Image (tube, helix red, strand yellow):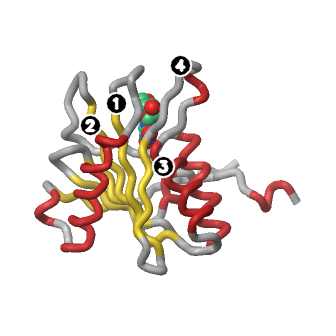
Amino acid sequence: MKKEAYQFNYEVYNSVEELSAPDAWLLNEAREVTAAAYAPYSNFNVGAVAKLSNGEIVAGTNQENASYPAGLCAERVLLSSAATLYPHVAIDTMAISYNNINGESNHPISPCGICRQSLVEYEERTKHPIRLILSGMGGKVFIIQTAGLLLPLSFGSADLK
Ligand code: THU
């Protein structure tokens, strides 16, 4: 028996002001688009905005449903739109923010497990890392160089061969 370890590095910024201008712009867009979320059940409005490698910008917000499991996260709404509007185009960077109507929105959240799986598949199909910028409506910002870092030992297409 031997033990393996997994660790990854990510960047921590104290606020949006410390980011480069393009990253700050993308994060502010994600913060703004939270207003387009449909989250009457959780009151947790999530916004995601991505810059594609062709320069286009695509957004997504969470879309809930009275039948709770039918709801969709902002990240997967974005991925579906991007793949439909710009097939085969990679995503360079995705900013994710949220506005918690019943609480605080000043610490970064990171994508849920299902979204991590979808992000990793998108990276795989476009053969390109998706850089993540994570933050609430204010406060610290995390930057992760590739979404795959959030899903070690992931299951993917190669496992189906
Ligand atoms: N949600 C997202 O849209 N993205 C995340 O990364 C975490 C959670 C949504 C799902 C649900 O509509 C609400 O936030 C509360 O979980």
N-terminal label among 2 and 4: 4
The kind of residue on which mark 1 rests is Phe
Q: Which mark is residue 99?
A: 2
Residue 141 rendering spot, x and y as whole percentages: 24, 54
Find out if the beta carbon at label 1 lies less than 8 Å from the nearest ligand 1 atom. Answer: yes
| Secondary structure category for the residue under label 2 | strand
Find out if the beta carbon at label 3 lies less than 8 Å from the nearest ligand 1 atom. Answer: yes
Mark nearest the camera among 1 and 4 is: 4
The kind of residue on which mark 3 rests is Glu
Cα gap from disc 3 to disc 2, whole angstroms: 15 Å
In the image, is residue 50 above or below residue 92?
Answer: above
Q: Which residue is mark 4?
A: 66
Q: Which mark is residue 75?
A: 3
The kind of residue on which mark 2 rests is Asn
Dot 4 alpha-carbon crowd within 10 angstroms: few under 14, some 14 to 19, many 20 or more: few
Cα gap from disc 1 to disc 3, whole angstroms: 14 Å
Residue 66 rendering spot, x and y as whole percentages: 53, 19
Q: Which residue is mark 1?
A: 44
The kind of residue on which mark 4 rests is Ala
**Residue contact between numbered discs 2 and 1, judged by CB atoms under 8 Å:** yes
N-terminal label among 3 and 4: 4
**Residue contact between numbered discs 3 and 2, judged by CB atoms under 8 Å:** no
**Residue contact between numbered discs 1 and 4, judged by CB atoms under 8 Å:** no
Q: Which mark is residue 94?
A: none
| Snapshot quadrant of residue 29 | bottom left
Q: Residue at x 64, y 58 (%)?
A: 121
N-terminal label among 2 and 1: 1
